[in-house]
Image (cartoon, rainbow, N blue to C red):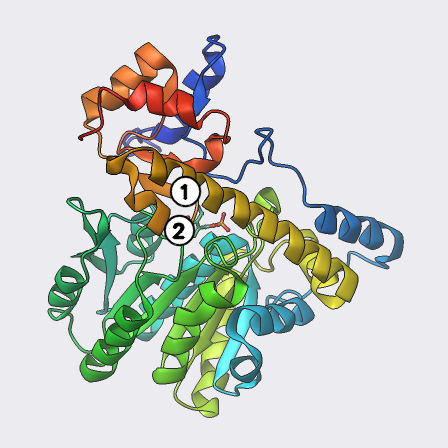
Amino acid sequence: FWRNLEPQAPDALLAIIRHYREDSRPGKIDLGVGIYRDEQGRTPVMAAAKAAEGLLWQTQPTKAYLGAEGDVVYTALLAQLALGESLARSDRLVGVQTPGGTGALRLGAELLARASPGATVWTSEPTWPNHGPIFTQAGLRMRTHRYYRAGDREVDVHGMLADLAHARPGDVILLQASCHNPTGATLGPADWRQIAGLCERKGLTPFLDLAYQGLGDGLEEDAAATRLLLNELPDALVAYSCDKNFGLYRDRVGALWVQSESSERSDAVYSNMLALARSLWSMPPDHGAAVVRTVLEADDLRAKWSAELDTMRGRINALREALGASHPALAPLARQRGMFALLPLAPAQIAALRAERGVYMAGNGRINLCGLTLATVPDLLDALRHYLPE
Ligand code: PMP
């Protein structure tokens, strides 16, 4: 029965993580992980989330099924956090709870494929490796646009807009809203206005992937581009993940919002989102969303969470400053945002760093800054000394 199935390549990053674990050298450094780590190298459950879990344990009356839309209070509170008060009230916007940001992206992809099977989805080169499979498995065609200029490690806005000029009316642009994975390179407000203008002129629909709100410049700042595009354009999608900014990774907490040109269209969109969600996962897992709802509902828990998020962001940006100040070739890191950056290293150098110095990173040179502490920054620099261009 399974004769036609070709074996699939294992996840390269998981192999790197395994090699790191098996390495017994004391000074080894893990820059391969995809998640936040604190100064002690741990990924603790956030105190606000723990407190919310305690409350749920004491007070949750039932675990009876919810509907395909998930927890509607969660989605409404999250809409205020992500999109702001006025968009959250819009009758042109509908949202459902999803299993993580991945579930939101996949549900959005299925909705796009149903609404417009011929649409092409444009994405940055490079991007998060799962973007490709999510959209192609839903049957959509994908094309890439330039994003990252290896020379100065900034966004190649000119190249990006030139490539997107080839998009056809009805095409979709998948945009990482902040903290670009894997480059860290960030579009400025003027760039986002140009992208909004291009979408308007060419009839393109933006699909925003907002997976790191609060881990770049701040909760409001990291959502500004998403809000701008939703305010400027008739149609848009937003895939949201709470897995990083609430530290709930394995609980799979996300949401998908879809904006259409009128409230009548929104009714049809919403019923299709529910029908598709039912066929994909019937209903999303409740626990993580209930935790987020409980945090956002209570002023004290919300303040506690927001302070913890500030600490996480502060740590990431302090590491960016320290690395950026330490070597001219690393200076762009201080301007970039989020946990990830690409180091200008060749594959042979990345392999040598692993074998000779116990420094582990993804094969494309992506590092997670959270694998460092301020104390181990000099160790990394020492390991990189022979490899970085002057
Ligand atoms: N988008 C981007 C850009 C990501 O980096 C990730 C997670 N690595 C996701 C979406 C999906 O997040 P989740 O774990 O919530 O599915």
Q: Which residue is nearer to you in this view: 67 or 246?
A: 246
Whether residue 235 appears in this view of the structure is yes
Look at the numbered discs 2 and 1 and tell me whether their residues touch, using CB distance below 8 Å. yes
In front: label 2 or label 1: 1
Image coordinates for residue 269, horizontal then vertical, percent: 45, 79
Q: Which residue is nearer to you in this view: 138 or 254?
A: 254
- Judge whether 18 appears above or below 179 on screen: above
Q: Which residue is mark 2?
A: 337
Q: Residue at x 23, y 71 (%)?
A: 171
Q: Quadrant of the C terminus?
A: top left
Image coordinates for residue 275, horizontal then vertical, percent: 50, 69
Amino acid tagged 1: Arg
Q: Which residue is nearer to you in this view: 255 or 154?
A: 154
Tell me: 118 left or right of 26: left
Tell me: 123 left or right of 235: left
Tell me: 175 left or right of 86: left
Residue 234 appears in which quarter of the rendering? bottom left
Q: Residue at x 58, y 33 (%)?
A: 39
Q: Quadrant of the N terminus?
A: top left
Residue 225 appears in which quarter of the rendering? bottom left
Some atom of ligand 1 lies within 8 Å of the CB belonging to the residue at label 1? no
Q: Residue at x 51, y 60 (%)?
A: 218
Q: Which residue is mark 1?
A: 320
Q: Residue at x 54, y 84 (%)?
A: 86
